[in-house]
Image: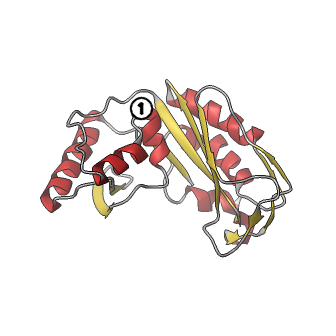
Amino acid sequence: MIEEAPIPNIDDRTREDLWKWSKMIIRAIGFRGLGTVEYLMDHEGCTYFLEINGRLQVEHPVTEMVTGIDLVREQIMIAAGSRVSPQEPHISGHAIECRVNAENPAKNFMPTTGTVTSLRLPGGPGTRVDTHLFPGCAISSYYDPLLAKLIAHNSTRTGALKRMARMIQETRIEGVVTNIDLLLKLLANEKFLSGNGDTSLVMQLMKK
């Protein structure tokens, strides 16, 4: 529902270990292309390998925003036989992505359907919106419920969070129930704002 880069509230040693382990795994299996190596971290700070996804991820815009690298272009170039630059990317600032979905959080995130009768999307410096929506667009239950990805970038995490909150507040999608209100709650939650959110946070908010 929300993705961000870089990872908040981890020490430099852990960050370096994640980079090192990911490189070792990718090289060991001879992977060539775009993908993610994913981990879970418990409340004690212990890290566990989760999975490898050998594809372009939904959350790839946050990586693009902090590195300036067009990952879609890189994927096409690799498929065409080109080589990716061996230089490690330079990380600049902080990026946050919110997924606006056609689903009803109050009904166990049941997918929703309808026709978009009115649409207003945010804009401005340091913002990006990836969407297929338009007024009159029919939302069906036969496809993924993702309606739009809102991405905010700023020099600091605090700045990116403020920018994202504004983006969510400016977004209007009428004609179909979405998770926008829940996204606003998450962005106002002290635990999330402090960088200490975990996988149970959404369910905790739903109980309130």
Dot 1, crowdedness within 10 Å: few (<14), some or many (≥20)? Answer: some
Residue lying at the far left of the rendered structure: 28
Quadrant showing the N terminus: bottom right
The amino acid pointed to by label 1 is Gly
Asked if residue 189 shows in the view, the reply is no
Residue 4 in the image: state x and y as whole percent: 48, 43
Which color scheme is applied? Answer: secondary structure
Q: Secondary structure at mark 1?
A: loop
Q: Nearer the viewer, residue 101 or 187?
A: 101
> Looking at the picture, does residue 178 appear above or below residue 165?
below
> Looking at the picture, does residue 100 appear above or below residue 90?
below
> Looking at the picture, does residue 80 appear above or below residue 146?
above
Taking the spot 65% from the left edge, 75% from the top edge, the residue there is 142
Q: Nearer the viewer, residue 112 or 108?
A: 112
Where residue 38 sits, quadrant-wise, is: bottom left
Quadrant showing the C terminus: bottom right
Q: Which residue is mark 1?
A: 68
Residue 202 in the image: state x and y as whole percent: 60, 58
Q: Nearer the viewer, residue 75 or 9?
A: 75
Taking the spot 16% from the left edge, 62% from the top edge, the residue there is 29
Judge from the rendering whether residue 43 lies leftward or rightward of residue 177; answer left or right: left
Taking the spot 70% from the left edge, 63% from the top edge, the residue there is 102
